[in-house]
Image (cartoon, coloured by chain):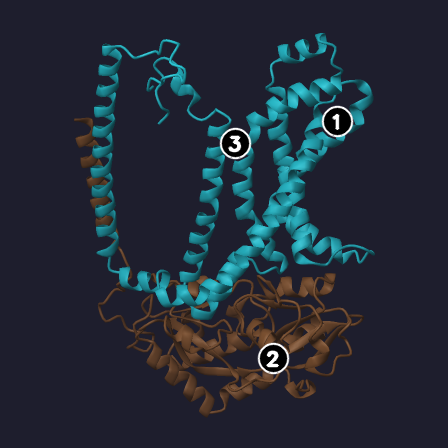
Chain colours: A brown, B cyan
């Protein structure tokens, strides 16, 4: 008798669970107008943009994407304007990479977070067209055994560090092909710490980050050089939910900004000129 | 309890009474019935849960993101390679932890005023390293020690991470050992001493063997915890199973590699659990309660 009641209880809870489940994404499908009248965003009339917290220069300045300073912050506001949202109708949410790729309801309309476009990722995410093409660069500190390296061969015996999940990591493994495994850290802060404390001899980061940290953050930082890009250069895209209705408009906005020269201007303003970093062979 | 015939057949053999056999038969029926009911209810509950999951609107996306067979297969070699690092770290650290923890526990159980500094040191060590979150110890040891740039300090993430694991876990395990040592009844020590054994001999031949036997299950518990925490050394740059899964997850923008790593870890700990059970059975502790009147098998 008791067992029967237990089963009934379990069944009821399972059903209740199932009944709760459909509380899912479905945005208010009531034809919500964007600031200029047409786009369906997470919140009516507001564009919600995701980026990582903390954000790093030169992508975001002072860890505050809403100040419009830093390359990605500036690009985000330019895209928003192109879509018809002025700065007052843009809100920022902090997101991690795992949140960006999570299958459930997204907390952002699009995310801008130096995410490289790749066919594997495109299986689960929508990308806008590229807003920035970058190379990867090797950074070390004075006194490191590879401070004078001039070729990829000079780097092979070095201990290399990179951030998890980045193209920097893939490129470090593939073009340097070091004899010891590349050491992988949670974020670029820890990568820098590892370099400073001698856990690794050199690190690989994207070129703008490399220029910034050698100039501003590392004591005695040395930019060893750029890594060869390989067949296709690394392209950063805005990330949207798979099948998002905004993918088309956002891509058009990025394309328009590239054509009218806005992206090139912002690049010149926020990302230091790459001329000083020779390509390693 | 099956009656056995002695080889020579000389001694009378105990045979359960009619009533006892009746009782046994009744218990068997009850056990079979319980198993059946449990089976049916499990199937029903699992079926409902699966039904609820599969019928939810986000299920196709979730299945694609977490249970993609192609991604699972593609990421398996790297994750397995990472797991091998976890296993090696775990094995080496486990040995060091047991040694350090045993020394700490002995230091804490020493009597006599002369040993006060040793006792205080061991107590302080346990207080500090049991109180510090493992991840902090890892960060401090991992980035701090090599930052000193002293001669002879290792700069390998695995060695530094292992050191942090040993520091933290030996503090936990020392307390397990101490509990074991102090659980040995005072009469045992009194008897040993009255037989003329010295304190050292009493410890070695009487106290520690009993203490050891009592702490093996919690020790294996800690070993299982260690197997999972060995993944934390990834924050120092080592690529273990968890980190390998994270890299694959970022590559494919798909969570399946995490599930693969989870399955591998469970597969790693299940043999450990079975080993504990086997050890307990061999030493005669498993189900030892069942022999007591009215106790039955523990459920």
| Disc 1: which residue | B119
**Mark 2–mark 1 distance (CA, rounded to whole Å):** 55 Å
* Front residue (pair A184, A130): A184
Question: Is disc 1 in contact with disc 3, using a CB cutoff of under 8 Å?
Answer: no
Chain identity of mark 3? B
Q: Look at the image and tell me in which quarter the N terminus of chain A lies.
A: top left
Chain identity of mark 1? B
In the rendered image, residue B102, in percent from the top left (x then y), is placed at 68, 32
| Residue A175 tag number | 2
* Front residue (pair A209, A155): A155
Q: Is residue B133 visible?
A: yes
| Disc 3: which residue | B217
Secondary structure at badge 3 equals helix
Mark 1 closeness class: few <14, some 14–19, many ≥20 residues within 10 Å: many
Image-based side of B236 in relation to A24, left or right: right
* Front residue (pair B166, B211): B211
Mark 3 closeness class: few <14, some 14–19, many ≥20 residues within 10 Å: some
Residue at the (54%, 71%) spot, across then down: A166
Q: Is residue A97 visible?
A: no
Residue at the (21%, 34%) spot, across then down: B36
């Amino acid at each position: 008798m008791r067992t029967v009641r237990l089963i009934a209880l379990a069944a009821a809870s399972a059903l209740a669970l199932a009944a709760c489940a459909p509380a899912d994404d479905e945005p208010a499908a009531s034809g919500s107008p964007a600031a200029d009248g047409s786009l369906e965003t997470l919140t009516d009339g507001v564009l919600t943009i995701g980026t990582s917290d903390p954000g790093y220069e030169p992508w975001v300045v002072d860890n505050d994407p809403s100040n419009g300073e830093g390359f990605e912050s500036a690009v985000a506001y330019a895209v928003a304007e192109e879509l018809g949202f002025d700065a007052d109708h843009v809100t920022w949410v902090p997101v991690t990479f795992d949140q960006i790729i999570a299958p459930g309801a997204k907390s952002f309309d699009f995310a801008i977070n130096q995410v490289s476009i790749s066919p594997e990722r495109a299986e689960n995410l929508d990308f806008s067209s590229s807003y920035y093409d970058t190379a990867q660069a090797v950074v070390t500190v004075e006194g490191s055994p590879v401070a004078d390296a001039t070729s990829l061969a000079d780097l092979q015996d070095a201990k290399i560090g990179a951030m998890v999940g980045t193209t920097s990591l893939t490129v470090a493994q593939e073009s340097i092909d070091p004899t010891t495994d590349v050491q992988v850290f949670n974020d670029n802060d820890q990568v820098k710490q590892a370099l400073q404390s001698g856990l690794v001899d050199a690190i690989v980061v994207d070129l703008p980050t490399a220029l910034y940290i050698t100039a501003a953050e590392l004591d005695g930082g040395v930019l060893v050089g750029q890594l060869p890009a390989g067949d296709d250069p690394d392209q950063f895209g805005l990330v949207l939910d798979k099948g998002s209705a905004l993918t088309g408009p956002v891509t058009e906005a990025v394309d328009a900004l590239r054509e009218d020269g806005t992206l090139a201007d912002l690049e010149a303003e926020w990302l230091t000129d790459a001329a000083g970093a020779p390509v390693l062979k | 309890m099956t009656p056995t015939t002695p080889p020579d057949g000389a001694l009378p053999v105990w045979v359960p009474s009619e009533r006892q056999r009746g009782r046994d038969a009744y218990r068997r029926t009850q056990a079979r019935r319980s198993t059946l009911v449990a089976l049916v209810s499990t199937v029903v509950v699992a079926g409902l849960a699966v039904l609820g999951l599969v019928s939810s609107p986000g299920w196709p996306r979730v299945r694609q993101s977490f249970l993609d067979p192609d991604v699972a297969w593609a990421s398996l070699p790297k994750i397995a390679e990472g797991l091998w690092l976890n296993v090696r770290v775990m094995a080496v650290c486990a040995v060091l932890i047991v040694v350090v923890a045993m020394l700490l526990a002995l230091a804490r159980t020493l009597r006599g005023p002369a040993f006060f500094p040793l006792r205080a040191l061991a107590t302080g060590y346990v207080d500090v390293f049991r109180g510090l979150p493992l991840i902090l110890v890892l960060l401090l040891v991992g980035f701090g020690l090599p930052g000193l740039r002293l001669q002879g300090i290792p700069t390998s993430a695995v060695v530094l991470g292992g050191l942090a694991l040993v520091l933290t876990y030996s503090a936990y395990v020392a307390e397990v050992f101490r509990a074991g040592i102090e659980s040995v009844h005072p009469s045992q020590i009194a008897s040993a001493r009255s037989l003329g054994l010295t304190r050292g001999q009493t410890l070695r031949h009487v106290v520690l063997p009993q203490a050891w036997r009592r702490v093996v299950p919690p020790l294996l518990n800690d070993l299982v915890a260690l197997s999972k925490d060995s993944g934390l050394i990834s924050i120092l740059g080592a690529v273990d199973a968890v980190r390998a899964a994270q890299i694959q997850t970022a590559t494919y923008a798909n969570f399946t590699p995490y599930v693969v790593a989870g399955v591998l870890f469970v597969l790693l700990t299940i043999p450990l659990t079975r080993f504990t059970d086997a050890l307990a059975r061999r030493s005669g502790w498993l189900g030892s309660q069942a022999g007591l009147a009215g106790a039955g098998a523990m459920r």
